[in-house]
Image: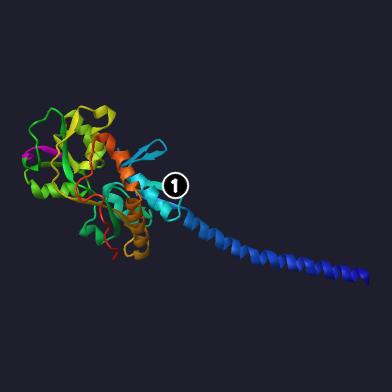
Amino acid sequence: MTTRRMMVAAAAVLALGLSACGSDDPETDTGAGGDSEAEGLKVGIKYDQPGLGLKQGSEFTGLDVDVATYVAKELGVEAGDIEFIQAPSAQRETLIETGQVDMVVATYSITDARKEKISFAGPYFIAGQDLLVRSDDTSITGPDTLDGKKLCSVTGSTSAQKVKETVPGVNLQEFGTYSECVAALASGAIDALTTDDTILAGYAAQEQYKGKLKVVGQPFSEERYGIGLKKGDTAQCQKITDAIKKMISDGEWQKIVDKNLGPANYKAGAGNPPTPDACA
């Protein structure tokens, strides 16, 4: 009788233990899934823009990188949990639409055409389109002096389209990256490079180009940099917008600008710091 009681008791303990394990597993699985979603953030940036988005080895630097890191922290994601992914101009919408990135922070001008495919939070910075030429070139002083000149820009950028419309006689050459354009400019293969003045200043300040290249200094457009995200995600847009506003109000925006664009003697132009648009 005693032995039988012991067996019953053992069976009860075993059943209780199995029941406890069964109830714990789903909770553990659910929790892990939720945590992994909250922990990581995939952010598209440029890899070849000094002062804005630059990858050197495993290190990422630039204004866009710092803005993305600040925004991510406000979203509850630490810097070490951000995965930076290269986002060339022509691929930015696709990366967002296909879910390869959660957001794009890559000198991404807010335009109506792009808003048909994705949503934007911002702007977080306002730049202007300008020209980069060789330091000894006095023939190019603005877009009106580009007729017949070899001009480089990047496929998929707003800069190339604007120049086509403004200067029909320009010989436009579109490359995959800005660094290719800069190398071609320095070697004499092209006459000028056009894109945002922030990007041009970063290249002109690079050690290998110091004294060889100059920004013309006649901006002829307004480029409103926004953070691209999945179309219609108003909730996420609002969180990012709130983060941008806080970044501006707490002084961190100015620190980021000074740190990344100050070395190129670049001063933020009219409209900065900007007021982010309402999320729609």
Asked whether 167 or 261 is in front, the reply is 261
Q: Name the residue under label 1.
A: 79
Image coordinates for residue 167, horizontal then vertical, percent: 8, 45
Camera-nearest residue between 99 and 221:
221
| Residue type beneath disc 1 | Ala
Q: Is residue 116 above or below residue 174?
A: below
Q: Which residue is drawn at 22% across and 38% down?
A: 200
Q: Which colour scheme is used?
A: rainbow
Residue 163 horizontal side relative to residue 109, left or right: left
Q: Where is residue 12 in the image (x, y as percent from the top left)?
A: 79, 70
Where does the magenta region start and end? 145-151
User: Relative to 164, is 98 on the left or the right?
Assistant: right
Drawn side of residue 173 relative to residue 260, left or right: left
Residue 147 is inside the magenta segment: yes
Asked if residue 70 is positioned above or below residue 18 in the image, the reply reads above
User: Total marks drawn?
Assistant: 1
